[in-house]
Image (spheres, coloured by chain):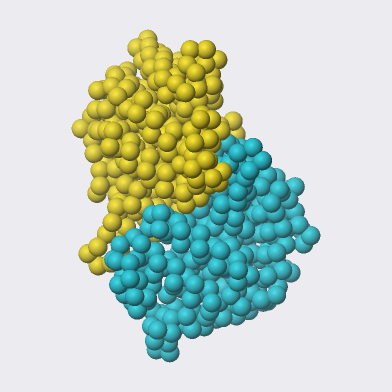
Chain colours: A yellow, B cyan
């Protein structure tokens, strides 16, 4: 099942991080962009093909040191049908390389519609009597809890049936996340605390052999104090932590999301790894044509940074 | 701009309803399904082509009496890349027929990612310096407010720049919507009331000539008492009302979302119109091969039902 596989990959690589594949065309090195624009034109197809090549080279350069990738659906949808093809190909390629693939889509809707989303990403789509087909077949999906259990249950059902996972937004990393998530209820609890309690309930029947549930939570690195509180409330949830690096979260900040056994959280970085070749720290060492080496160096630096902070 | 166009179409057709195009393969009449499975196989492609044909015949049968359609993205994503092509083709076809096209995707994310979603649905995607391309280019998109203004602002920017619209989830139609949305804050307001106040702010700078904003709200027909309260709070927001018909909301229930001038809301029905040919009320009159006439009859019945309730 998802959460057991994730934990085993994290242990095997000794690396509790995930690389976000959020490929804006501006992130792609010029030589790849030019090659693909030449071949397919400076259009959605050319951009999508450039991104696919970029993603594959990144995966080649990282797969032996990281447990998982997290493609962000928005960055594929923005290139239309060609972008969705690249999302699909990227997921397939990552899985072939033994990586766990977490689709970041923050999907949400009423029950029957959430069921359709779950069929798309986690389960199977019914074609006809006795015919169904897996579609994107990723390992896990991020979801938004605003509609309550009705909108979550179909995903949880597929977590049970197909051994998949979800991560429910609890406290997001952005500045204005408090507008709703920090509101205090009349009983004195914040919305993010209430949602964390729901996450415990929602995931109670899909717990794996290491005591963690296929229903995880998203808690931003940018809110370390809230992370401390949430780590205590979330009994069995693995925490997916965005906001490290480019968004300002430090290794010390993310350490709050881990349990004392060094498990319990997986930290995402996207831009800092994809664009490492543009970063002050690496661009003197690696030229643009060696962008993959810069990404690998940054991924290893991040791993060490976080492992050290956890071990303190 | 979106909201002005929508209001003009509603007035022109004298019809404050929108047809949800949420095409599960089970909704498609057998003769279409068989034709397409024969041609393309009983697979995702065959299912997607069957849905496209179904959608087009429905649109042909309805476009002169309805102002808008609302394709639900989940039901296209579940057929993979082929499904997304059908979503695109359906939107194009609806717009060619003069219909407003509202994509129901409930998208949400942190700022830069919300920007990517907005580029996909409302704005344009940057390909290179001085080259950008519209992608799905629908008229409006539903969005989820859980991340606060950061996750909404990029959409609002494109509402202003491209004359598009969004509908923010406020109080959803499903049973468990209260788990988060009904929680009372310590100041005695519910979350849905707080979100409604945000919607007023978020839409304050994109108000059209009829006094309504390009930033609307979603309020379910299944919660008429909350709709009464929300109609008062939401100063300039058009309300998109799901939950009429199959989900149990009546015309009297939805009437609360309208203002006294008969404007201010648009009521969605999906299954009751798409599957009218299966309904007790119509199946004795229209055989399956005349499914489009059944849908038209139901759409006209719904229009009368709601217009009558509003005029009371």
Which quarter of the rendered picture does the N terminus of chain B lie within?
A: bottom right
Q: In this view, does B41 lie to the left or right of B255?
A: left
Answer yes or no: is residue A177 visible.
no
Q: Residue at (70%, 64%) from the top-left corner?
A: B5
The image shows residue B67, relative to residue A92, as above or below, that is below
Q: Residue at the far bottom: name it.
A: B285
Front residue of B61 and B92: B92
Front residue of A173 and B4: B4
Percent coordinates x, y for residue A134 in the rendering: 29, 52
Q: In this view, does B45 lie to the left or right of A179?
A: left
Answer yes or no: is residue B287 visible.
yes
Q: Residue at the far left: name it.
A: A209
Q: Residue at (27%, 27%) from the top-left corner?
A: A9
The image shows residue A69, relative to residue A81, as above or below, that is above
Which quarter of the rendered picture does the C terminus of chain B lie within?
A: bottom right
Q: How many marks?
A: 0
Q: Residue at (49%, 66%) from the top-left corner?
A: B21
Percent coordinates x, y for residue A273 in the rendering: 46, 24
Q: Residue at the far front: name it.
A: A38
Percent coordinates x, y for residue A16 in the rendering: 34, 23
Q: Residue at (24%, 39%) from the top-left corner?
A: A1
**Which quarter of the picture shows residue B115?**
top right
Q: In this view, does B224 lie to the left or right of A110?
A: right
Percent coordinates x, y for residue A89 in the rendering: 37, 43
Q: Residue at the far right: name it.
A: B209
The image shows residue B246, relative to residue A307, as above or below, that is below
């Amino acid at each position: 099942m998802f959460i057991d596989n994730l934990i085993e990959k994290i242990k095997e690589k000794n690396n509790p991080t995930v690389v976000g594949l959020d490929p804006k065309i501006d992130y792609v090195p010029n030589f790849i962009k030019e090659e693909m624009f030449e071949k397919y034109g400076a259009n959605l197809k050319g951009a999508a093909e450039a991104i696919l090549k970029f993603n594959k080279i990144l995966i080649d350069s990282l797969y032996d040191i990281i447990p998982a990738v997290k493609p962000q659906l928005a960055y594929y949808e923005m290139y239309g049908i060609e972008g969705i093809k690249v999302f699909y190909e990227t997921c397939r390629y990552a899985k072939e390389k033994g990586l766990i693939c977490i689709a970041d889509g923050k999907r949400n809707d009423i029950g029957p519609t959430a069921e359709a989303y779950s069929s798309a990403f986690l389960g199977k789509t019914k074609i006809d009597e006795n015919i169904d087909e897996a579609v994107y077949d990723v390992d896990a999906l991020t979801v938004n809890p605003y509609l309550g259990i009705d909108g979550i249950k179909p995903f949880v059902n597929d977590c049970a049936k197909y051994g998949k996972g979800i991560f429910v937004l609890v406290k997001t990393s952005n500045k204005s996340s408090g507008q709703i998530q920090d509101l205090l209820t009349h009983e004195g609890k914040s919305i993010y605390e209430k949602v964390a309690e729901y996450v415990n309930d929602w995931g109670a029947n899909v717990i794996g052999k290491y005591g963690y549930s296929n229903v995880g939570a998203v808690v931003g690195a940018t809110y370390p104090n809230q992370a401390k509180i949430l780590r205590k409330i979330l009994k069995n949830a693995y925490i997916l932590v965005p906001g490290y690096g480019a968004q300002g979260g430090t290794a010390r900040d993310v350490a709050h999301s881990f349990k004392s056994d060094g498990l319990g959280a997986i930290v995402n970085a996207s831009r800092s790894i994809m664009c490492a070749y543009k970063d002050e720290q690496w661009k003197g060492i690696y030229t643009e044509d060696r962008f993959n080496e810069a990404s690998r160096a940054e991924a290893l630096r991040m791993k060490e940074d976080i492992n050290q902070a956890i071990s303190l």
